[in-house]
């Protein structure tokens, strides 16, 4: 993958957008230039079964029409079934060698890391990128860790200059420069886009 693809990484599930139409938000975000999309359908009220798969396919179809990578959060079986562009897994989701073996070498495998040990593992098992967070406080993940700021992000970028890094957690139009200056290639965002009154303008600001 190209590290520029992490520049504005939009993450969404139907539960993140409350009463607003999620597919319309995704289309507006794609049209405004998001560079990667993650399908993250989890938590209370999340779709299940056929509705879950159909919603994923609808999102994937839209990403394909814009040439934007479609990444599945957590669910490797769904990623394989849909021939998604990749998966994102956390430390508790699955073992990285197994994920790589199932997905194959051509697909994108992203992993969350919070320590140097986890970063070293991600490097040795050839993760395509790492997600580091939460940088700031977030309300979008119930089991998020404490906000960590950019200290570890900066250390990770220094240790692994060739490994693409995306910052996540509480990132907004007003604070996104901080993780970029610390060495992130891009920012991964849920609420700043899902809850924006002007999705297109918000995405454009992240791209400036
Ligand atoms: C880009 C990116 N970075 C980190 C995460 C968090 O993954 P994880 O810790 O597995 O938590 P859940 O998102 O699965 O709740 C992510 N999804 N994307
Ligand atoms: C999905 C996720 N993972 C995080 C991590 O720290 O690993 S924080 C987070 C939620 C990001 O949403 P928002 O942009 O609304 O803060
Ligand atoms: Mg996960």
Image: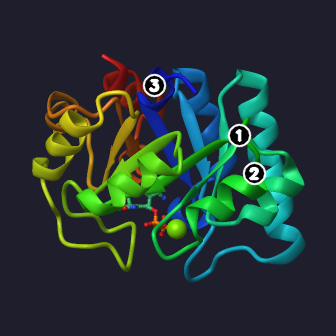
Q: Label 3 belongs to which residue?
A: 3
The response on whether ligand 1 sits within 8 Å of label 1 is: no
Specify which label sits upstream in the sequence, 3 or 1.
3
On screen, residue 108 above or below 170:
above
Residues at badges 1 and 2 in contact (C-beta under 8 Å)? Answer: yes
Is residue 189 in view from this perspective?
no
Q: Please tell me which residue is depicted at 83% across the width and 50% down the height of the picture.
A: 57
- Reading the image, the residue beneath label 2 is 103
Mark 2 closeness class: few <14, some 14–19, many ≥20 residues within 10 Å: many
How many neighbours does mark 3 have within 10 angstroms: few (below 14), some (14-19), or many (20 or more)? Answer: some
Q: Nearer the viewer, residue 132 or 56?
A: 132
Classify mark 1: residues with Cα within 10 Å, few (<14), some (14-19) or many (20+). some
Q: Residue at x 12, y 53 (%)?
A: 149
Per the image, the residue denoted by label 1 is 107
Real-space CA distance between mark 1 and mark 2, rounded to the nearest whole angstrom: 6 Å
Q: Secondary structure at mark 3?
A: helix
State left or right for residue 15 relative to residue 105: left
Q: Position of residue 58 (x, y in %)?
A: 81, 47
Res 184 visible = yes
- Colour scheme of this structure image? rainbow
The image quadrant where one finds ligand 2 is bottom left
């Amino acid at each position: 993958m190209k590290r520029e693809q992490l520049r504005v990484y939009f993450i969404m599930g139907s539960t993140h957008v409350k009463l607003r139409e999620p597919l319309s938000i995704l289309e507006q975000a794609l049209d405004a230039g998001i560079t990667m999309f993650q399908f993250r359908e989890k938590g209370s009220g999340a779709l299940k079964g056929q509705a879950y798969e159909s919603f994923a396919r609808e999102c994937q179809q839209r990403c394909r029409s814009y040439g934007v990578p479609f990444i599945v959060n957590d669910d490797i079986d769904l990623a394989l079934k849909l021939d998604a562009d990749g998966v994102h897994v956390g430390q508790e989701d699955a073992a990285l060698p197994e994920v790589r073996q199932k997905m194959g070498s051509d697909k994108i495998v992203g992993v969350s890391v919070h320590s140097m040990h986890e970063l070293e593992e991600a490097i040795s098992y050839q993760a395509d990128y790492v997600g580091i967070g939460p940088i700031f406080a977030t309300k979008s993940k119930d089991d998020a860790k404490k906000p960590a700021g950019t200290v570890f992000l900066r250390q990770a970028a220094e240790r692994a200059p060739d490994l693409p890094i995306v910052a996540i957690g509480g990132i907004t139009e007003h604070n996104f420069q901080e993780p970029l200056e610390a060495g992130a290639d891009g920012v991964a965002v849920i609420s700043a886009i899902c809850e924006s009154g002007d999705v297109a303008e918000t995405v454009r600001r992240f791209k400036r």
